[in-house]
Amino acid sequence: ELRVPVIVADDPMHCVVKGTGIMLENLDKVATLMRSGRR
């Protein structure tokens, strides 16, 4: 057990869609990070 607090999403698909939207809005930053090898 890690004993780390977690939140269980009521609508997991909404979380995926929202996260994907945020990533697409910041695609230039994501691409820069991917090229630099930083994670």
Image: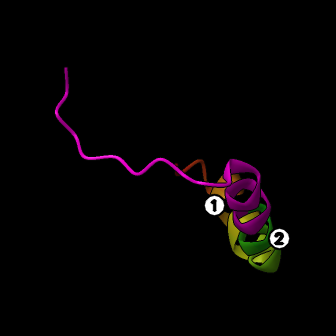
Which one is earlier in the sequence, the residue at label 2 or at label 1? Answer: 2
Q: Tell me the kind of residue under disc 1.
A: Leu
Camera-side residue of 39 and 5: 5
Q: Which residue is mark 2?
A: 24
* Location of residue 14 by image quarter: bottom right
| Drawn side of residue 3 relative to residue 5, left or right | left
- In this rendering, the answer to whether 33 lies above or below 26 is above
- In this rendering, the answer to whether 30 lies above or below 3 is below
**What secondary structure is found at the residue carrying circle 1?**
helix
Residue at the outermost top position: 1
Task: Tell me which residue sits at (80%, 71%) in the image.
Answer: 21
- Residue 25 x %, y %: 80, 79
The span shown in magenta is 1-19
Q: Which residue is mark 1?
A: 33
Q: Tell me the kind of residue under disc 2.
A: Leu
- In this rendering, the answer to whether 13 lies above or below 33 is above
**What secondary structure is found at the residue carrying circle 2?**
helix
Task: Tell me which residue sits at (22%, 40%) in the image.
Answer: 4
Task: Tell me which residue sits at (63%, 60%) in the image.
Answer: 33
| Drawn side of residue 10 relative to residue 14, left or right | left
Camera-side residue of 19 and 6: 6
* Location of residue 29 by image quarter: bottom right
